[in-house]
Image: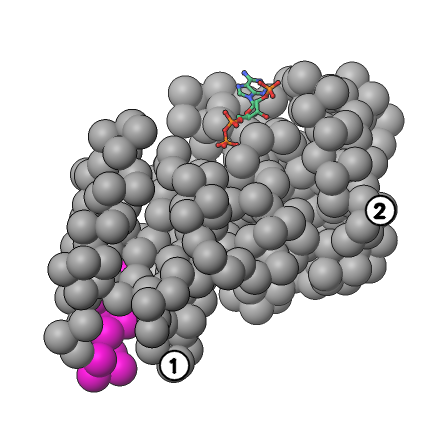
Amino acid sequence: TDRYAVIGNPISHSQSPFIHQEFARALGQDISYEKLFAELGAFRPQVEAFVAAGGKGLNITLPFKGDAFRFAQEVTERARAAEAVNTLTFRDGKVYGDNTDGVGLVRDIVENLDYPIAGQRVLILGAGGAVRGVLEPILQQKPASLTIANRTVIKAEALAHHFARYGKVEAVGYDALAGRSFDIIINATSTSLSNEMPPLPHGVFTARTLAYDMVYSSGLTPFLQRAQGENAGMLADGLGMLVEQAAESFSIWRGIQPDTRKVTNMLREVLA
Ligand code: ATR
């Protein structure tokens, strides 16, 4: 049995063990997958103990994705761009880091929701780690334009500058969105967690806009309620992204791509 885990603080709410165990069951893979709690500042010793005990790979969640990036000896381009790692692989005495969040989001939008990103006007709300983690894979899709709106505009500007080598990124405050509309609007702020929403002007959603909240919840988040009220064409939460990023991690570790649809449907029922 090969041993895997997800490490974070807090960690009790994590659905990752359920997802990975279902992938393994469907594919006949002999793995175990547990939750690891680490005190703030104790990421490194926890991970070292896990590796010493024979651990093969880790998923990393808040607030340790930056620590995992620094812990990795080799990282992929998308992890380097994000300066964050959510997947560590321990192989032949080396530590490999990758970030599957962005590809998880892109696959959920392009494949599951069947909504192209290429050629579309994309708006991302927020400028924290959640945004940094997904920008490179979104730019790889060649959107017509990519705009980052944030309450603190200077943070959006810093991200736009950091990612300029991967494609053109515009940074604005929320006020500057008045009179504009977008094909895909992704809420990557932390507002849904406190039942709030970003201060979006009216009119940014159209009848063909995909409104996507990276947070998942049983009911509609305030952002999605607002999108629905403005007749946005499609609404989605982040459950599909959660399962897709897990599938990509699983495939990095096991060399086989799991089927995600069934697990997403199961989780949807569990969380309802
Ligand atoms: P994460 O790593 O999850 O992205 P973060 O780095 O704390 O978390 O970023 C939270 C994001 O939500 C930020 O973009 C923040 O905006 P500021 O940079 O201006 O703080 C955004 N955010 C949080 N509460 C908000 C609110 N009430 N209205 C608008 N944006 C909000």
Labels in figure, total: 2
Q: Position of residue 124 (x, y in %)?
A: 67, 38
Q: Is residue 25 magenta?
A: yes
Question: Label 2 amino acid?
Answer: Lys
Q: Quadrant of residue 14?
A: top left
* Span colored in magenta: 19-29
Residue at 47% in and 47% down:
69
Q: Disc 1 or 2, which lies upstream in sequence?
A: 2
Residue 50 relative to residue 237: left or right: left
Residue at 41% in and 20% down:
194
Instruction: Identify whether 234 is placed above or below 39.
Output: below
Instruction: Identify whether 217 is placed above or below 57.
Output: above
Mark 2: secondary structure? loop
Q: Quadrant where the N terminus lies?
A: bottom left
Q: Position of residue 123 (x, y in %)?
A: 72, 39
Q: Quadrant of ligand 1?
A: top right
Q: Which residue is mark 2?
A: 168
Q: Position of residue 42 (x, y in %)?
A: 26, 34
